[in-house]
């Protein structure tokens, strides 16, 4: 689970996977967070 806070809004991103894809899942989540931070 990853989250970020924008002003007074908490954005929670849920996902499920196993350890075999953990590195790729983290990279994808960080990309999602970067895009969400840049969204208006």
Image (spheres, rainbow, N blue to C red):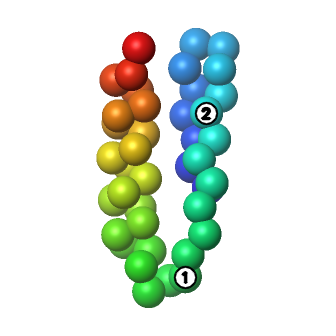
Quarter of the figure with residue 34 = top left
- Residue 31 in the image, given as x and y percentages of width and height: 33, 47
Q: Are marks 2 and 1 in contact (CB under 8 Å)?
A: no
Give the vertical position of 22 relative to 34 (above or below): below
Marks 2/1: CA–CA distance: 23 Å
Few, some or many residues within 10 Å of mark 2 (<14, 14–19, 20+): few
Identify the element where label 1 is drawn: loop
Give the vertical position of 15 relative to 19 (above or below): above
Residue at the (59%, 61%) spot, across then down: 15
Identify the element where label 2 is drawn: strand
- Residue 22 in the image, given as x and y percentages of width and height: 44, 74
Residue at the (42%, 39%) spot, across then down: 33
* Viewer-closest of 17 and 26: 17
Taking the view exactly as shown, the residue that stands out farthest to the bottom is 20
- Residue 23 in the image, given as x and y percentages of width and height: 37, 72
Taking the view exactly as shown, the residue that stands out farthest to the front is 40
**In this rendering, would 40 be left or right of 7?**
left
| Nearer-N-terminus badge (2/1) | 2
Residue at the (55%, 75%) spot, across then down: 17
- Residue 21 in the image, given as x and y percentages of width and height: 42, 79
Give the vertical position of 9 relative to 27 (above or below): above
Q: Which mark is residue 18?
A: 1
Q: Which mark is residue 35?
A: none
Number of disc labels: 2
Identify residue for label 2: 11
Quarter in which the C terminus is drawn: top left
Quarter in which the N terminus is drawn: bottom right
């Amino acid at each position: 689970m990853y989250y970020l806070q924008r002003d007074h809004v908490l954005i929670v991103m849920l996902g499920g996977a196993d350890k075999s894809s953990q590195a790729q899942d983290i990279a994808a989540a960080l990309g999602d967070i970067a895009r969400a931070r840049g969204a208006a």
